[in-house]
Image (cartoon, rainbow, N blue to C red):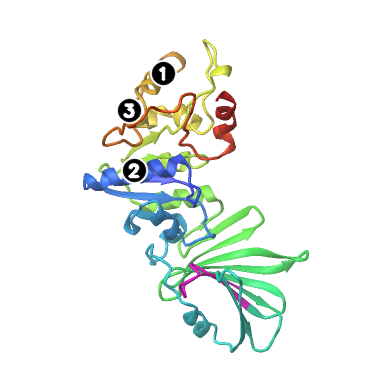
Amino acid sequence: MTIYNINFGIGWASSGVEYAQSYRAQMLRHLKEDAKFIFLDFIASENIQTLTANLGFQDNEVIWLYQYFTDIPIAPTTYTIDQLKHDVGNTVTRTEVDQQGKVQRLYLDHQPQTFVTCYMKNTDQPYVDRAEFVVNGMLIRKDFYSYVRVFSEYYAPYDNYAKLYMRQFYNENGSIAYQEIIDGDAHSYVFNDARLDSKEAFVAYFIQQLHLTHNDIVILDRATDIGQAVLQNKGQSHVGVVVHAEHYSDNITDGTHILWNNYYEYQFNHAPYIDFYIVATDLQNQILSQQFAQYTTFQPRIRTIPVGSLDQLTMPSVERQPYSILTASRLASEKHVDWIALAV
């Protein structure tokens, strides 16, 4: 049995969804359950391993949609700038390093407008996260690395800017695993055995390649625009939905109509195809159960599983300061920390 947990992105300023997944990963490890955490967003700012490891995910637990179809495993960045110089093949005539040491520019063949800009993983290490290749003043390619080159982006001049037109994803030996053709907002994914003309079709193809069985569980932490692809290709596997937030709008709900949170509307409207829902509190469980009974003909299985827990409560040794409030939320506008300040 494998438990697949589906999410979109991950970053340095991750949301509560990613932290909830991190806590879940710890719990499933403790239970010795095989779990995979799937990230569907395209991520180019960092090697995804840097971001997932930062939240405590183990490399063998992580599946990145775009890297899944290659034979390169999730791994730390260890590709060095000396390897890059060797692979470039041209003579490096001059090197410039920024003040922070995070960016090194390699000038090639005495051409002032031909260079490779290397973005280092850390200032005190020789490892390159990505490199940008400029020829005669025009950006033509970006390469992205872990221990080898993972993928490249190709650019062409268009209306005085560099237009991205293709990504190539590689196997460990440098052969091409597949290509992503890009024309503005239109994306096509080209494999030896398939051509997929949308991100939704790409996700559906990926779900098919998992070869899910009745022993597998798919947990949707996020499902916007991909819920249908999952449900249509889940096979005999069991699908669960985690409700990470307030699930409806109270001020637009009356005795006969309810406005679901748009992030969960598809999952709620297709309750017959969902095996279970997970909420964080008993109160939300009671409210959601009552709303399903009142506004729908469905009576789904809803379970309460807290996001995290404390081994013990630590009480203060001195009296607390009165009229003070602590928030553990992110400093994001939707958290309305300004309201808390006004309330105090």
- Asked which secondary structure carries label 1, the reply is helix
Q: Splitting the image into 4 quarters, where does residue 306 fall?
A: top left
Horizontal side of 165 relative to 54 (left or right) equals right
Residue at x 64% of width, y 64% of height: 165
Q: Specify the farthest residue to the front.
A: 318
Residue designated by label 3: 304
Please give the label number shown on residue 287. 1
Residue 54 position within the rendered picture, expressed as x and y whole percent measured from the top left: 41, 55
Kindly identify the amino acid type of the residue bearing the numbered disc 3: Thr
Is tag 1's residue or tag 2's residue first in the polypeptide sequence?
2
Give the mark toward the camera: 2 or 3: 2
- Asked which secondary structure carries label 2, the reply is helix
Q: Is residue 213 visible?
A: no
Instruction: Name the one closer to the observer, 60 or 58.
Output: 58
- Asked which secondary structure carries label 3, the reply is strand
User: Are there few (<14), some (14-19), or many (20+) residues within 10 Å of tag 3?
Assistant: some
Please give the label number shown on residue 340. none
Is tag 2's residue or tag 3's residue first in the polypeptide sequence?
2
Point out the stretch of residues depicted in magenta. 116-132
Horizontal side of 122 relative to 115 (left or right) equals left
In the rendered view, tell whether residue 38 sits above or below residue 113.
above
User: What separation in Å lies between label 3 and label 1 (alpha carbons)?
Assistant: 12 Å
Residue 106 position within the rendered picture, expressed as x and y whole percent measured from the top left: 60, 80
Query: Is residue 126 a member of the stretch shown in magenta?
Result: yes
